[in-house]
Amino acid sequence: MKTRVWVVDNVVDKQRIYPQIQEAAEWLRAGEVVAFPTETVYGLGADAANTAAVDKIFAAKGRPSDNPLIVHVANVVQVEAIVAAIPPVAKTLMERFWPGPLTLVLPKRAGTVSERVTANLPTVAVRMPDHPLALALIEASGLALAAPSANRSGKPSPTTAAHVLADLNGRIAGVIDGGPTGIGVESTVLDCSGEVPTILRPGGVTKEALSEAIGRVEEAIGIGDEQTAPKAPGMKYTHYAPKAPLWIVAGPPSLLQRLVDESRAGGKTVGVLTTEENKSRYAADAVMACGTRRELETVAHRLYDTLRQFDETGVDLIYSEAFPEEGIGVAIMNRLRKAAGGRVIRE
């Protein structure tokens, strides 16, 4: 099966009918899977109520069956149809941050979405993407769309349609090409089903912003044990990994360069993931900057694309600088640790 590509400008005129979006919506209603851009990364969408369609997501990605999916909606009416209740704190967050990169975990309404979407958990993860094409597609389909990132499971998430096709060409029905995504790392996942809102995955909305809006917010971020079903994506398995093994170096550039020199002396080809400020300080087989330390948003935006570029170099291993864990830096380091499988070298 050849994957269909629809090219659509990401500035959507709501007064126009776009044949590309209408056709993609028809395919979704027919039980196919279609990738589309959001403000974070490209998602791989299917009708959240159609188990056969959702199974196609897992098959295309090679995704573990106990890893739940996020349901994407275009309005609050769609949320009310699939959740048992919307707590006041969740309503406040929807008003403040939707549409946007915030996923809320809420108690689900029985019989509304496939159990494959929720991994048989009593909760469902929901968000409203802040991207005109994503919203237009959801509205045109009339469906709530289960949509994880549109990549092979474990690989860096896609921030362009080319990334989607590199991983899934021939494995999915189609992709809407709306150009590069904006934020570059996935949404923040916040569990609102308990007494205290708890961050399950850091992302585009920071803990500081959440705390300012609703007060106390806790964190439960990490890789879960093998017996426990994760409550949100990104909690249990290694994700976002390039082909070559990745190590995070929590130390000065001199330490990272020494590790590079030792590895190259041992016959390895080595890549370095750094920033524009430090790029000239390293000598390696491939040195790539993914933004600036002055603006960590640029690192978040380019992180996955840079990890994929290392795949093209064919290096044997990669050393990455660490980043300050504040603001969006928390999400950056979360993704890097997952990509590295937790491998961190310290002084």
Image (tube, rainbow, N blue to C red):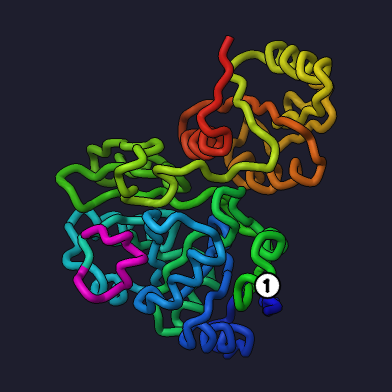
The answer to whether 92 appears left or right of 156 in the picture is left
**Residue at the image point whose x is 32% and y is 62% from the top:** 118
**Residue at the image point whose x is 42% and y is 68% from the top:** 146
In percent of width and height, residue 158 lies at 62, 56
Residue 136 appears in view: yes
Position of the N terminus, as image quadrant, is bottom right
Magenta residue span? 109-122
Residue 328 appears in view: no
The answer to whether 22 appears left or right of 46 in the picture is right
- Is 149 a magenta residue? no
* Residue 90 drawn above or below residue 302: below
> What's under tag 1, amino acid-wise?
Gly
- Taking depth in this image into account, of 36 and 346 the one nearest to the observer is 346
In percent of width and height, residue 112 lies at 26, 75
Q: Which residue is mark 1?
A: 170
- Is 116 a magenta residue? yes
- Taking depth in this image into account, of 302 and 58 the one nearest to the observer is 58
* Residue 291 drawn above or below residue 283: below
